[in-house]
Image (cartoon, rainbow, N blue to C red):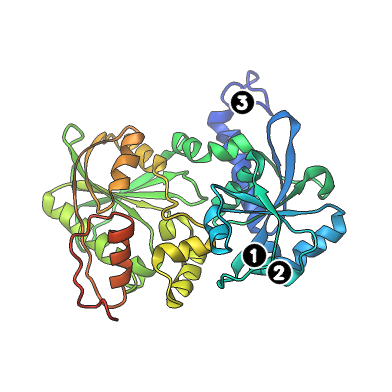
Amino acid sequence: MPNEDVKIGTVDGDLARWFGNPGRLTVQRAISELRAGRPVKLTGERGASLTVAAAEMLAGARIAAWHRATGGAPGLVLPAPRLAHLGVTADGPSYVALGGLMADEIDALLLDVEPAAPVFEYRPADDLEAAALDLVKRAYLLPAAIVLPAAAGQQTALAEVSASAVASYHEQSARDLSIATRTRVPLAEATDAEFVIFRGGDGLHDQVAIVIGQPNPLEPVLTRLHSACLTGDLFASLKCDCGDQLRRAVGEIAVHGSGVLLYLDQEGRGIGLLNKMRAYGLQALGHDTMDADAVLGYGPDERRYGVAGAMLALLGFRRITLMTNNPEKISALESFGVNVVGHKRIMGAVNPHNHNYLSTKAKRAGHMLGEISEEYAAE
């Protein structure tokens, strides 16, 4: 018998506990729709709404066709880093009018790697348009959102999501996180290891913690936050030092006696695998790792750490010694209630393929890498 005190369609009673936070679920549904190439309805304050689509899933020809089919004038919301590459100085996201632009000109706005771009009209994006861009980024798609007033959009039922749900998605995901299972898995660098699987997080994937030994929660726990890197962790790519850092961190925690490694689903500093590969292509043309991300429309680091803080809290670890070269990780964790009592650098091997990558992180992102050998600087 269902609980008669629970009112279906509301968050009364145990509904939120049983079925998850409704706002977060609407964001997840919207993400799935955008990744499938379908538009969604985004609502704001005082009845404002937009029909939103991921620009890369439509591309220029379909965007132009959408313009003709709806009778509306779709606009393109682009982030400041992408606009800068197109020769526009902006303090934040901007709305670009697409009326009169041809399909190939729209495509140039999205992915053209040359500074030349069609002449276009633009203005600062309003709050709802900025939320549309944020929603597309949460889907790990190219940060470019096609928007038009909902009344001018498709009349069929669309998945609906509010701008407030998009804004609170990461924090709500952290609050809804839970431990699904845990089991012993001996590793080459640490035979006394336990995998703890968390259900939830920003994406539609589970999050993983590896607890090594028996950490004492009353003492600072040696901790490594490691963002997933398929190419480095699994395939031993030489373009980064991620695989080295992962294995060395596990080994150093084992030698220390105990600790935890959080393996976070934040590929490519939070831009996703597809866009990381696009950035690699831009690096091959001469852009450094930060400029390549900016050409695509991303900031220097798109990762968020509320979920990491929640994982540590669920494990009972509130005081940690953090293994990192990135000072921003320290401040980010502390903002989510984790007491970082100290830090320890974790170095990977330098080679001709990752030298520029590491140098850029040290010189432009402030990573604590010390003096990187100039042995490969001319490579």
User: Neighbour class for label 1 at 10 Å: few (<14), some, many (≥20)?
Assistant: many
Q: Which mark is residue 105?
A: 2
Relative to residue 64, is residue 188 drawn left or right? left
Tell me which amino acid carries mark 2. Glu
Q: For the residue labelled by badge 2, is the local secondary structure a helix, a strand or a loop?
A: helix
- In depth, the one of 80 and 309 nearer the eye is 80
Answer with left or right where residue 296 lies relative to residue 181: right
**Measuring 19% from the left and 54% from the top, which residue is drawn there?**
345
Label whose residue precedes the other's in the sequence (2 or 3): 3
Q: Quadrant of the C terminus?
A: bottom left
Which residue is depicted at the point 46% across and 54% down? 299
Q: Is residue 10 above or below residue 252?
A: above
Kindly identify the amino acid type of the residue bearing the numbered disc 3: Val
Structural crowding at the residue carrying mark 3, measured as other residues with C-alpha within 10 Å and reported as few (<14), some (14–19) or many (≥20) = some
Q: Which residue is mark 3?
A: 11
Residue 102, above or below 36: below
User: Which residue bears the numbered disc 1?
Assistant: 109
Mark 1 touches mark 2? (CB < 8 Å)? yes
Between 250 and 163, which is closer to the camera in this rendering?
163
